[in-house]
Image (cartoon, grey):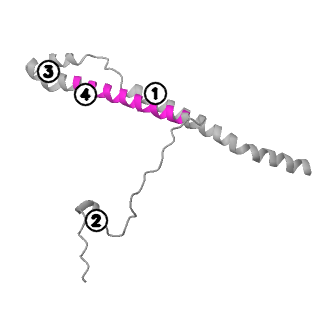
Amino acid sequence: MRTRHLLIATLCAGLPAASAAAQESSAKLWRARQQQQLQTAYRAPTVSPYVNMLRDGMPAVFNYYTLVRPQLEQNQVNHQDRSSIHRLQSEVDRETQAKSSGRAKQTRPSVVRRRPRYMDYSGYFGRVPEPEAQP
């Protein structure tokens, strides 16, 4: 009976470490899926947008400014978004690694110069002059 309690206590002691490892692995899996979705969502088109210039019914110049050029501009915006998302994700990964290894930046709390007061709008509208004391 005593060994059974010892076994249960040992298993319960190891649960927080196991759950933390499971959470970390599930976070990595989720991040990998998100990255894969981003890569598949922003694939380059298989057909050149310039093919739209050959459409019948409108002159080629009209097709260029209404179909081709907006698509090229959208591709450029998508590329910029993708690179900024990648940059931000790498910053988050670096900060997460720094926190887990104990090398995170120590930030000091902001200093409050005066106590906040109820219904005090002096920060928005300036200070109201204090009434002068009557002798």
Q: Amino acid at mark 4?
A: Gln
Q: Residue 102: which quarter of the image? A: top right
Residue density around tag 4, few if under 14, some if 14–19, many if 20 or more, within 10 Å: few
Residue 101, how many percent across, how many down? 60, 34
Are the two marked residues, 3 and 4, in contact with CB atoms closer than 8 angstroms?
A: no
Q: List the residue tagged with mark 2.
A: 121
Q: CA distance from mark 3 to mark 2?
A: 56 Å
Q: CA distance from mark 3 to mark 4?
A: 14 Å
Q: List the residue tagged with mark 4.
A: 74
Q: CA distance from mark 1 to mark 4?
A: 21 Å
Which badge, 1 or 2, is on the more N-terminal residue? 1
Which badge, 1 or 4, is on the more N-terminal residue? 1
Residue 12, how many percent across, how many down? 76, 47
Range of magenta residues: 72-97
Which-is-in-front pick, marks 3 and 2?
2
Q: Amino acid at mark 1?
A: Gln
Residue 121, how many percent across, how many down? 28, 65
Residue in the picture at 41% in, 57% down: 112
Residue in the picture at 19% in, 26% down: 70
Q: List the residue tagged with mark 1.
A: 36
Q: Amino acid at mark 2?
A: Tyr
